[in-house]
Image (cartoon, grey):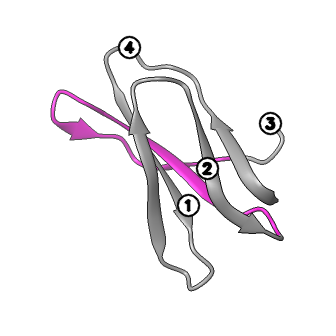
Amino acid sequence: SDGTVTVVWDAVPGAEFRVRCRRPDGGWRVVGRTRGTRMEDGGAGAGPLPEYTVSAARDGARSPEAAAVPGS
């Protein structure tokens, strides 16, 4: 990573998406929330591509997190 990563996913009508990134210490940080289908993380840092997950929330329920697959 050069410090900027774009995460893209398929839409679920009416859902809000949360994108999280694994920190080097093993914890997680929330990159952001959106109703769109992509999010850019400008705070990824240089080096290996970090792990990202995306989950959807709709009608008070949140989906399990799905791991992002690099380059797909």
Q: Measure the alpha-carbon separation of dots 3 and 1.
A: 17 Å
The residue at which mark 1 appears reads as 21
Mark 2: which amino acid?
Asp
The residue at which mark 4 appears reads as 13
Q: Which residues are magenta?
A: 48-68
The residue at which mark 3 appears reads as 72
Q: Earlier in the sequence, mark 1 or mark 2?
A: 1
Residue 41 is labelled as 2
Comparing 20 with 59, the one in front is 20
- At x 67% / y 61%, what residue is drawn? 44
Where is residue 10, by image quadrant?
A: top right
Assess disc 1: are there few (<14), some (14-19) or many (≥20) residues with their C-alpha within 10 Å of its C-alpha: many
Q: Is residue 51 magenta?
A: yes
Helix, strand or loop at mark 3: loop
Residue 46 is labelled as none
Mark 1: which amino acid?
Cys
Q: Measure the alpha-carbon separation of dots 4 and 2.
A: 23 Å
Q: Measure the alpha-carbon separation of dots 4 and 1.
A: 24 Å
Q: Earlier in the sequence, mark 3 or mark 1?
A: 1
Q: Measure the alpha-carbon separation of dots 3 and 4.
A: 22 Å
